[in-house]
Amino acid sequence: MADHFRQSNVRAVLDFGFTKFIPLDEARAVHDYGFATERARADAIIGHWIHIDPHTGLEGVREL
């Protein structure tokens, strides 16, 4: 994926908006993967789009 971004001369944002619909424990693992992927490929990935279900309250805020 990152090689494709580089070859296309693109810096991408990873879209993890779907995590709004899964339990926070599962979302944390996806978010951790995203941040690790960004750190390892910072020349191709510039950030993330993350949604947190507001009904998760303080626990959701802490995940941000």
Image (cartoon, rainbow, N blue to C red):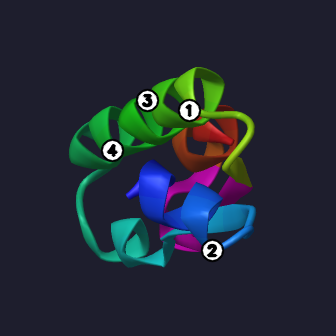
Mark yes or no: residue 49 visible.
Answer: no
Identify the residue under disc 1. Answer: 35
- Residue 53: percent from left, percent from top: 50, 70
Q: What residue type is labelled 3?
A: Asp
The residue at 58%/64% (across/down) is 7
- Residue 4: percent from left, percent from top: 46, 64
Q: To which quarter of the image does residue 28 belong? A: top left
The one of 25 and 33 positioned closer to us in this rendering: 33
Q: To which quarter of the image does residue 57 belong? A: bottom right
Identify the residue under disc 3. Answer: 32
Q: Is there CB contact under 8 Å for labels 4 and 2?
A: no
The residue at 42%/72% (across/down) is 20
What is the CA distance from the residue labelled 4 to the residue labelled 2?
A: 25 Å
Magenta segment range? 47-57
Image mark for residue 8: 2
The residue at 56%/32% (across/down) is 35
Image mark for residue 30: 4
Residue 1 among magenta residues: no
